[in-house]
Image: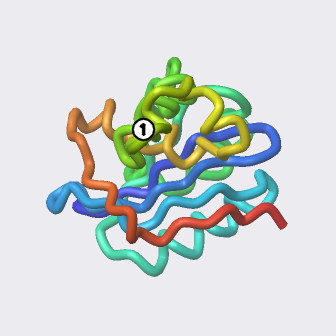
Amino acid sequence: MSKVIAIDPGLSKCGVVIADIKEKKVYEAVVIKSHLVLKYVKKNYHIEKNVQLLIGNGTGSKNYIKYLIQYEPDLIIAEEKNSTYRAKQRYFDIFPLTGIKCFLPREIFILNKNLDALAALIIMEDFFNIKFDVSKKIKTKTWLK
């Protein structure tokens, strides 16, 4: 399996990342309302070839796992301890501060950011022990409808 769909589950929204393990590249990173995530994953699971599903074992994951269990053996349940906290640091790895912003506290730049997709990336990187390339040109969106 070379493609992975990683999910950071949450009660109101979820982060989802689609990546290629062999290429170590992220293709899509989105934040989706919780009630839409299973539909989104199902659609992408059937579009992609040779895909694994990776879901963190944190907040609300049991509800998603009940549904995703149908995708075994392609379903992996992974540890996600501190993934959202670590996503804040990863945000600055991808989008480094430049100029005078370097002298300001980092926290003021991420107050309103949805870091759930980056938390899904952290879960995936931890599980596969790979640092994925996240281009600033990847398809990203916050889909909160």
> In which quadrant of the rendered view does residue 143 lie?
bottom right
Q: Residue 93: horizontal and vertical position, in percent?
A: 35, 39
The residue lying toward the viewer, choosing from 31 and 103, is: 103
| Secondary element type, mark 1 | helix
Residue drawn where x is 60% and y is 27% of the image = 107
Task: Tell whether 38 sits left or right of 86.
Answer: right
Q: Badge 1, how many Cα within 10 Å: few under 14, some, many 20+?
A: few
Name the residue furthest front: 100
Q: Residue 40: percent from the left, percent from the top?
A: 64, 68
Say above or below: 130 vs 42: above
Residue receiving disc 1? 92
- Quick one: which residue is furthest to the bottom in this view? 47
Q: Nearer the viewer, residue 29 or 22?
A: 29
Q: Quadrant of the N terminus?
A: bottom left
- Quarter of the image with the C terminus is bottom right
Left or right of 13? Residue 57 is left
Could you tell me which residue is drawn at 26 percent across and 54 percent down? 133
Note whether residue 57 is visible.
no
**So how many labels did they put on this image?**
1
View extreme (left): residue: 22
Taking the spot 62% from the left edge, 37% from the top edge, the residue there is 110
Question: 115 or 19: which is nearer to us?
Answer: 115
Percent position of residue 120, x then y: 49, 43
Asked if 63 appears above or below 14 in the picture, the reply is above
Coloring scheme used: rainbow
Q: Residue at x 70, y 58 (%)?
A: 32
Q: Is residue 138 visible?
A: yes
- Tag 1: amino acid: Phe
Q: Position of residue 54 (x, y in %)?
A: 44, 45
